[in-house]
Image (cartoon, rainbow, N blue to C red):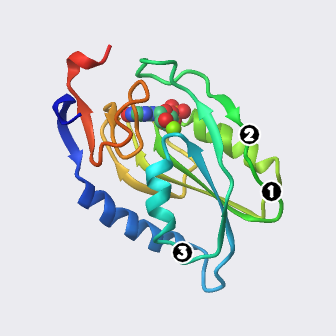
């Protein structure tokens, strides 16, 4: 796997430190009366991020998975998000935090946010590990961002290319000859 990576842009230690700080920002945003959250991780990209994030969140929480797919196979640009699994849990009256790996065009998140809002949560916030400012909408509807990165296709720490590299521990860029 290492041989396929041209360049690491975020080593695992930096990600780990940022995830810990992000958890602090999330907790602080709810004020002193800590809520019982319902996290909505967007599969499959958010799996590693959410696993690390929740262990830094000292809150009572439930998890309601949702699965959207945007990438037809080896494409590097997202198509229309397709719902594979509807949000699997009750959101009505709950404090909901959507968690995704990356905000690119913003279509995936907007679609999850619409699904969540329709279930009448008490509050709705969104955390993403990565944001690509070059492509994300200016008024991207996210509350917490781990890192702003350049407009690069990246893999690792949950992010895939053709469903591979999710287990690569750092975030990096593939060798150009491996992508279309
Ligand atoms: P959006 O709908 O364009 O914001 O796309 C977001 C989704 O596309 C994310 O949830 C990721 O699954 C995927 N995605 C976007 N950029 C990348 C990338 O650089 N590497 C891997 N997956 C990505
Ligand atoms: Mg994803």
| Residue occupying image coordinates x 21% and y 16% | 177
Q: Is residue 177 left or right of residue 61?
A: left
Which of the labelled discs sits on residue 86, or is there none?
2
| Residue depth check, mark 1 versus mark 3: number of the one nearer the observer | 1
> How far apart are labels 1 and 2 at the CA level?
11 Å
| Residue occupying image coordinates x 31% and y 32% | 152
Indicate which disc, 1 or 3, sits on the residue closer to the N terminus.
3
- Callout 3: SS: helix
Is the residue indicated by label 1 positioned so its CB lies within 8 Å of ligand 2? no
- Callout 2: SS: loop
Residues packed near mark 3 inside 10 Å, few (<14), some (14 to 19) or many (20 plus): some
Q: Is residue 147 left or right of residue 41?
A: left
Which of the labelled discs sits on residue 106, or is there none?
none
> How far apart are labels 1 and 3 at the CA level?
22 Å
Instruction: Decide which of 37, 109 is in the foreground and name it.
Output: 37
Place of residue 101 in the rendered image (x, y in percent of width and height, measured from the top left): 46, 45
Q: Which residue is mark 1?
A: 90
Place of residue 169 in the rendered image (x, y in percent of width and height, measured from the top left): 29, 48
Residues packed near mark 2 inside 10 Å, few (<14), some (14 to 19) or many (20 plus): some
């Amino acid at each position: 796997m290492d041989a396929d990576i041209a360049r690491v842009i975020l080593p695992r230690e930096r990600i780990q430190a940022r995830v810990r700080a992000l958890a602090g920002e999330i907790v602080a945003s709810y004020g002193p009366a800590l809520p019982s959250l319902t996290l909505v991780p967007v599969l499959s990209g958010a799996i590693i991020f959410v696993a690390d994030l929740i262990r830094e969140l000292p809150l009572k929480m439930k998890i309601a998975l949702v699965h959207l797919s945007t990438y037809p196979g080896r494409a590097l640009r997202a198509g229309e998000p397709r719902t594979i699994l509807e949000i699997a849990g009750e959101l009505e009256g709950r404090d909901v935090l959507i968690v995704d790996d990356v905000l690119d065009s913003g279509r995936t998140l907007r679609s999850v946010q619409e699904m969540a809002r329709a279930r009448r949560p008490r509050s709705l916030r969104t955390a993403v590990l990565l944001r690509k400012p070059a492509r994300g909408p200016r008024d991207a509807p996210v509350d917490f961002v781990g890192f702003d990165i350049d407009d690069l296709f990246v893999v690792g720490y949950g992010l895939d290319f053709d469903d591979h590299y999710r287990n690569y521990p750092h975030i990096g860029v593939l060798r150009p000859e491996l992508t279309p």
